[in-house]
Image (tube, helix red, strand yellow):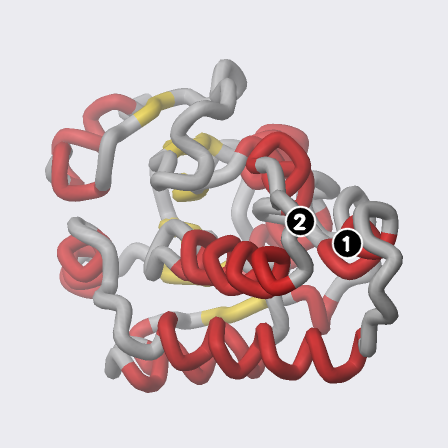
Amino acid sequence: MIKAFIFDFDGLMIDTEFSSYQTWLDIYKNYQVDLPMSEWIKCVGSSNDDFDPIRYLRTKTKIKIDEKQLRKEQLIAHKNISETMPVLPGVIEFIQFAKQNRIKLAVASSSSYNWVSTHLERKNILAQFDFIVTADDVEQVKPAPDLFIKVKERFGLKNYEGIVFEDSAHGVEAAKVANLYTVAVPNQITKNLKFEKADIILDNLSSISPNQLLEQFAD
């Protein structure tokens, strides 16, 4: 029996993955350097350990880089763009269904709590979630399963009593290691990734009703 819906945030609820890439792309253009998607995708749904945009930029230019200033500029631009972005299709409907059917709701994100909560509050849906766990709460983010294990512990979930909604391969991998069902919903950044570990792959969350989805995972 499914007892919880667990949402990723960036790129799944709001398409902040795209605005993050776009703002770094704009910065790279100032240095006349390309930012290949093949490199950028390494950090999507995870941290900057596999790919750090400043570290990579330094390998491609001899121009002196003020790291603190660049990160500040990118964050401001990223925030300004993402604040105008809507909640992605189907997300609200799944939240409403969960509340009506006593299904627990969680967000498990590799971003910071401040980043996630600020956006959810702005969209007036922060209070809908029973638990939010972020990079601030674990030693390792996705593809490690730590975030999802935290959710299972908080809700008292047994294996496969929760459905995870993810847009990244890192997130899907983490959810599977944590023994949770996974629904991959690729976005314009992650659409070319392989999601063979996902139980279901959807174009967007509005392409299936919550009841139809639950039928897919019926005992």
Please say if 210 is above or below 90: above
What x and y, as percent, mark residue 185?
A: 34, 36
The count of marks equals: 2
As shown in the figure, which amino acid type bears the numbered disc 1?
A: Leu
What x and y, as percent, mark residue 59?
A: 86, 47
Q: Is residue 77 left or right of residue 29?
A: left
* Residue 9 falls in image quadrant: bottom left
Residue at left offset 58%, top offset 47%: 45
User: Few, some or many C-alpha atoms within 10 Å of disc 2 (few <14, some 14-19, many ≥20)?
Assistant: some
What x and y, as percent, mark residue 180?
A: 52, 35
Can the viewer see residue 154?
A: no
What residue is pinned by disc 1? Answer: 57
Can the viewer see residue 95?
A: yes
What x and y, as percent, mark residue 27?
A: 59, 64
Q: Is residue 21 left or right of residue 12?
A: right
Residue at left offset 53%, top offset 47%: 157
Residue at left offset 40%, top offset 43%: 165
Q: Earlier in the sequence, mark 2 or mark 1?
A: 2
Mark toward the viewer: 2 or 1: 2
What residue is pinned by disc 2? Answer: 33
* Residue 30 falls in image quadrant: bottom right
Please say if 159 is above or below 94: above
Q: Which mark is residue 15?
A: none
Residue at left offset 25%, top offset 22%: 216
Please say if 112 is above or below 1: below
Residue contact at pointers 2 and 1, CB within 8 angstroms? yes
Quadrant of the drawing holding the N terminus: top left
